Image (tube, coloured by chain):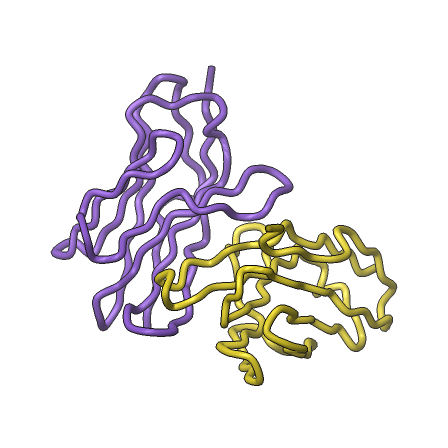
Chain colours: A purple, B yellow
């Protein structure tokens, strides 16, 4: 069975500082990995996804994530935080190969301090 | 192309009342899902439908029923609402050709008094 662990339910960074949101996964087969963002009172939208091509994945709004198989990690980064990045971020994993359910982490709320 | 739509957006029920949450997608996806979101608990899968004509229980199915009406529509029914079902409900859809990426609706905020 697959699972996802997001370290830190709340992360605070200063505007302009590096954003690092941590995600570790477990999967018995090669995984697909996702990061979603949720702004207040909205649904979830995809930031980026890993599907076994390049291990460094670039997404929207300047975010990127690196798939590290040896560490079973898929951490999300952004070099310089903007106030508009304040939101909740969810990491998710799916087994590869045809239809598979997706398992979500419990989320990390990002606060950006001016 | 509206993506995933959900109705209603807000609902207040009294304990014991019933209601149906509606979800539709226009992306020709095979699979559809219902999640609930509660503070600190992330998204929990209630029911899913891998393809038209099939439905299966997820992590927290008790107190809910679903119907996959056709390929586009997937409804969630609360037969006798309880305060513990106060939550935000999201519908999503996906397709294997898209690596099972979930496309989400805007959510329904339900309060049970």
Residue sitting at the far top: A114
Identify the image quadrant of residue B48: bottom right
Which quarter of the picture shows residue B32? bottom right
Work out which quarter of the rendered image holds the N terminus of chain A and state it.
bottom left
Position of residue A39 in the picture relative to residue A101 (left or right): right
Q: Horizontal and vertical percent for residue A100?
A: 38, 72
**In terms of image quadrants, where is residue A102?**
bottom left
Q: In the image, what residue occupies the spot 41% across and 34% down?
A: A11
Q: Please, which residue is most extreme toward the bottom here?
A: B53
Name the residue nearer the viewer: B58 or B2. B2
- In depth, the one of B68 and B65 nearer the eye is B68
B28 shown above or below A13: below
Figure label count: 0
Whether residue A5 sits left or right of residue B28 in the image: it is left
Point 33% across, 50% down: residue: A49
In the image, residue B37 above or below residue B82: above
Q: Is residue A77 left or right of residue B96?
A: left
Instruction: Name the residue located 81 percent from the left edge and 69 percent from the top edge.
Output: B19
Q: Position of residue B64 (x, y in %)?
A: 68, 76
Query: Can residue A64 be spotted in the picture?
Result: yes
């Amino acid at each position: 069975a697959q699972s996802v662990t997001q370290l830190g339910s709340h992360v605070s960074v200063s505007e302009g500082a590096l954003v690092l949101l941590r995600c570790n996964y477990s999967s018995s087969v090669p995984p697909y990995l996702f990061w979603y963002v949720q702004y207040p009172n909205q649904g979830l939208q995809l930031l980026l996804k890993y599907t076994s091509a390049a291990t460094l994945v670039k997404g929207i709004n300047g975010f990127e994530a690196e798939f590290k198989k040896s560490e079973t990690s898929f951490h999300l980064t952004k070099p310089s935080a903007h106030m508009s990045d304040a939101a909740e971020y969810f990491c998710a994993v799916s087994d590869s190969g045809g239809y598979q359910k997706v398992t979500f982490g419990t989320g990390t709320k990002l606060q950006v301090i001016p | 192309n509206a993506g995933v739509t959900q109705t209603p957006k807000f609902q207040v029920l009294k304990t014991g009342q019933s209601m149906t949450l509606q979800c539709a997608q226009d992306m020709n996806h095979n699979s559809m899902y219902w999640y609930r979101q509660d503070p600190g608990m992330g998204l929990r899968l209630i029911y899913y439908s891998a393809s038209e004509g099939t439905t299966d229980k997820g992590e927290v199915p008790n107190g809910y029923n679903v119907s996959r009406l056709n390929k586009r529509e997937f409804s969630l029914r609360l037969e006798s609402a309880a305060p513990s079902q106060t939550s935000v409900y999201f519908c999503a859809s996906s397709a294997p050709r898209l690596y099972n990426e979930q496309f989400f609706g805007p959510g329904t905020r339900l309060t049970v008094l």
